């Protein structure tokens, strides 16, 4: 069952098109990820979905509510965690959570109960009385997520939840997101970390220059690359001397030399290991290792978008500094 | 009911985080005290105190309210915590009312500091205090909404302060606070009539020293008009500039 449906969504700032005619739907209970580089249109999309930005064209429907027409009703069932931890620096963690709950009309007793519970759940109960400005980046991020779920939203929007924080905090946040999802919260997440998208998301959309270029589960996205089989051989001695002969004898395979002792075979058809073992044995080589190489989501992303993952990560983190 | 929980808590947060902070108390309270003392010491007789009281009260409200909005709105906008409020399921009108109510209360309190001083040194009998409170409230509302209009038009706190001064200081001279509008050059007078403070001060003058020039009910109607106009322009600007 789709709980969020986006049709022909477009966002223009003057002549610049930030989001260009995108379509997608999110199913109840899934974690849906938007993966793309800086300026791909991730934040523009999330801003339109949450009502912080006007829609130029298209429609957004969340739990049957037309976001364009009745944004306030839609906001009452959304949890929103922006890309910056934007709580109030002078207020302590507990006060911040209680204040955020009050914005959703939750009474004093109930919001205090929920704030205490969330501080415990997020491992922040020992700093609940400290002002937000004294928190570390990781703690700020966790409290911002806690503030986003204090009113028990049906869908949670997370914009770059782990960008710019330490590895341990990022790991904890990913674990918290998975826990929330297990308890039934549907999650929409934007990220530029491929491994994060792969680890967290049930389905991922690759977004580049405001357009969704591919959408699917990790397995579905992998299919294009997985059609090609890859086997990596490691030999006891150098193969550079026989590289040309090898390519000539096995002309129907693509051969890639990794280093002096290692090479990879690529083929759409099944690769017969025995013929290669026999071939090398006849020429006095010993095969130390022959292993199947499975493509990563990163390779899929690079193949589809033409964008190097490392460049994307560097750009984003450079931008944050 | 749920929206009012949000309204009350936004107001409470602003009071605690901004209005009751020492720098703001010093700006909001010491500033009118200083103005009051300056004018009262300069005033030669007790009659003079009643003459200048409406002007001092109006000025205290004007400076107190407009200064506050630059902080509570521009600062939060800059730090992006204002986005949190925009994303809450409460109407934009109620949200902005909750953000401005604190400044209105602050302005009303500021207005009565000169009154306390004046009551110590002169006889204030015969004044219709209900009318005084009504005019103080409406001066506070229109000045706050003027501050809101300025806060929405800029992006930095310092810009808001500078822009506020562009309005505030001319208003001291143009709105009849200390110089009667009738004695201003004819060419300047139209400016006086397009500023809301003129009408609030006129009510205070009518009731405190009997020198107002317009009927009180007309002043109130004009102030209501200004309040609605400034608030609706600000809301329109927020919708256009902040929900872009």
Image (spheres, coloured by chain):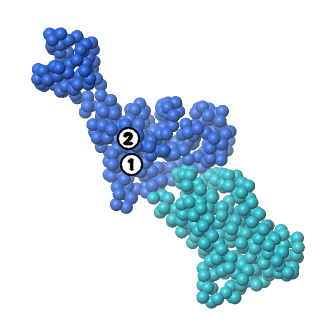
Residue plotted at (14% across, 10% down): A282
| Front position in the image: A201 or A277 | A277
| Front position in the image: B39 or A244 | A244
Check the image and report above or below for B176 versus A43: below
Q: What element carries label 2?
A: helix
- Whether residue A113 can be seen here: no
Label 2 or label 1, whichever lies nearer to me, is 2
Q: Residue A298 is drawn in which quadrant?
A: top left
Q: Colour of chain A?
A: blue
Chain that bears disc 2:
A
Q: Where is residue A234 in the image (x, y as percent from the top left)?
A: 26, 17
Check the image and report above or below for A54 versus A260: below
Q: Which chain is cyan?
A: B
- Using a 10 Å C-alpha cutoff, classify the residue at mark 1 as few (fewer than 14 neighbours), some (14 to 19) or many (20 or more): some
Residue plotted at (35% across, 57% down): A16
Chain that bears disc 1:
A
The circle on residue A39 is 1
Q: Residue B138 is drawn in which quadrant?
A: bottom right
Check the image and report above or below for B19 versus A229: below
Q: Where is residue A264 in the image (x, y as percent from the top left)?
A: 23, 23
The circle on residue A312 is 2
The circle on residue A307 is none
Check the image and report above or below for B192 versus A110: below
Q: Is B236 on the left-hand or right-hand side of B94? A: left
């Amino acid at each position: 069952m789709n709980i969020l449906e986006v049709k022909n969504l477009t966002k223009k700032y003057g002549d610049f098109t930030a989001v260009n005619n995108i379509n997608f739907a999110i199913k109840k209970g899934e974690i849906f990820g938007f993966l793309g580089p800086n300026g791909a249109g991730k934040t523009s999309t999330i801003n339109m979905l949450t009502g912080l930005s006007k829609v130029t064209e298209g429609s957004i429907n969340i739990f049957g509510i037309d976001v364009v027409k009745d944004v306030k009703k839609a906001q009452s069932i959304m949890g929103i965690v922006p890309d910056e931890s934007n709580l109030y620096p002078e207020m302590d963690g507990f006060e911040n959570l209680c204040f955020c709950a009050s914005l959703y009309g939750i009474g004093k007793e109930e919001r205090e109960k929920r704030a205490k519970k969330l501080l415990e759940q997020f491992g922040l109960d020992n700093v609940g009385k400290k002002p937000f400005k004294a928190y570390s980046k990781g703690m700020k991020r966790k409290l911002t997520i806690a503030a986003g779920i204090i009113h028990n939203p049906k869908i949670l929007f997370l914009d770059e939840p782990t960008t710019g924080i330490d590895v341990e905090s990022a790991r904890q946040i990913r674990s918290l997101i998975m826990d929330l999802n297990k308890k039934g919260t549907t999650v929409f997440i934007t990220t530029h970390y491929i491994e994060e998208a792969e680890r967290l998301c049930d389905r991922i959309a690759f977004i580049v220059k405001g357009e969704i270029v591919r959408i699917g589960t990790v397995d579905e996205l992998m299919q294009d690359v997985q059609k090609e089989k890859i086997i990596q051989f490691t030999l006891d001695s150098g193969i550079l001397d026989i590289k040309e002969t090898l390519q000539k004898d096995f002309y129907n395979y693509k051969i890639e030399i990794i280093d002096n002792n290692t090479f990879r075979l690529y083929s759409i058809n099944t690769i017969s290991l025995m013929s290669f073992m026999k071939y090398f044995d006849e020429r006095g080589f010993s095969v130390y290792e022959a292993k199947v190489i499975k493509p990563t989501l990163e390779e899929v992303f690079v193949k589809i978008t033409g964008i190097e993952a490392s460049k994307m990560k560097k750009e984003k983190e450079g931008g944050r500094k | 009911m749920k929206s009012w929980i949000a309204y009350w808590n936004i107001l409470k947060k602003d009071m605690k985080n901004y209005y009751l902070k020492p720098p703001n108390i010093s700006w909001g309270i010491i500033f009118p005290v200083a103005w009051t003392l300056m004018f009262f010491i300069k005033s030669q007789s007790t009659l003079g105190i009643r003459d200048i009281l409406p002007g001092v009260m109006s000025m205290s409200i004007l400076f107190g309210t407009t200064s506050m909005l630059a902080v509570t709105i521009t600062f939060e906008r800059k730090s992006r915590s204002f986005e949190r409020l925009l994303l809450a399921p409460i109407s934009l009108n109620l949200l902005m009312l909750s953000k401005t109510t604190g400044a209105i209360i602050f302005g009303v309190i500021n207005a009565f500091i000169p009154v306390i001083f004046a009551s110590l040194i002169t006889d204030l009998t015969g004044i219709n205090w209900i009318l005084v409170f009504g005019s103080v409230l409406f001066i506070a509302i229109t000045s706050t909404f003027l501050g809101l209009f300025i806060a929405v038009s800029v992006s930095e706190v310092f810009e808001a302060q500078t822009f506020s001064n562009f309005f505030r200081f001319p208003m001291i001279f143009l709105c009849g606070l200390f110089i009667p509008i009738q004695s201003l050059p004819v060419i300047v007078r139209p400016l006086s009539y397009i500023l809301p403070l003129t009408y609030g001060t006129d009510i205070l003058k009518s009731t405190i020293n009997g020198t107002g020039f317009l009927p009180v009910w007309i002043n109130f109607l004009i102030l209501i008009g200004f309040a609605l106009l400034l608030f609706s322009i600000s809301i329109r600007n927020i919708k256009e500039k902040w929900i872009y």
